[in-house]
Amino acid sequence: MLEEELKPKVVLYARVSTKKQEEYLKNQIRRLEEYANFQGWQYEVISEIASGVNENRRGLLKLLNKI
């Protein structure tokens, strides 16, 4: 239990702009998870398909609230 408590907890955020880019989103998540696992981090993934112009994206707001 103590070992789990010592691992940093991080939030991984991945985003693409359109549904057509969904495969890129999956690749982003996979690469982020691989890196987090390599580092030994505990993590939560937040991902979304939304325009970067929109600052009121649900996933971005969730990320900002967590940090």
Image (tube, grey):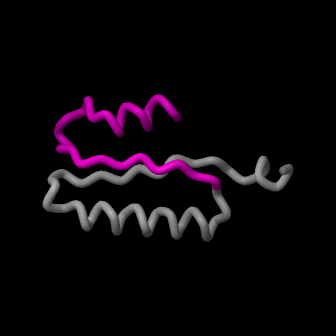
Q: Position of residue 1 (x, y in %)?
A: 84, 50
The magenta-colored residue range is 42-67
Instruction: Decide: is 54 above or below 38.
Output: above
Q: Position of residue 12 (x, y in %)?
A: 47, 52
Instruction: Decide: is 24 above or below 54.
Output: below
Q: Position of residue 19 (x, y in %)?
A: 16, 55
The structure residue drawn at horizontal position 78% and vertical position 51%, both measured from the top left corner, is 6
The structure residue drawn at horizontal position 24% and vertical position 54%, both measured from the top left corner, is 16
Asked whether, in this view, residue 50 is left or right of residue 60, the answer is left
Instruction: Decide: is 65 above or below 2.
Output: above
Q: Nearer the viewer, residue 58 or 64?
A: 58
Q: Position of residue 4 (x, y in %)?
A: 77, 52
The structure residue drawn at horizontal position 47% and vertical position 29%, both measured from the top left corner, is 65
Asked whether, in this view, residue 31 is left or right of residue 48, the answer is right
Q: Is 57 one of the magenta-colored residues?
A: yes
Question: Which quadrant holds residue 56?
Answer: top left
Q: Is 8 one of the magenta-colored residues?
A: no
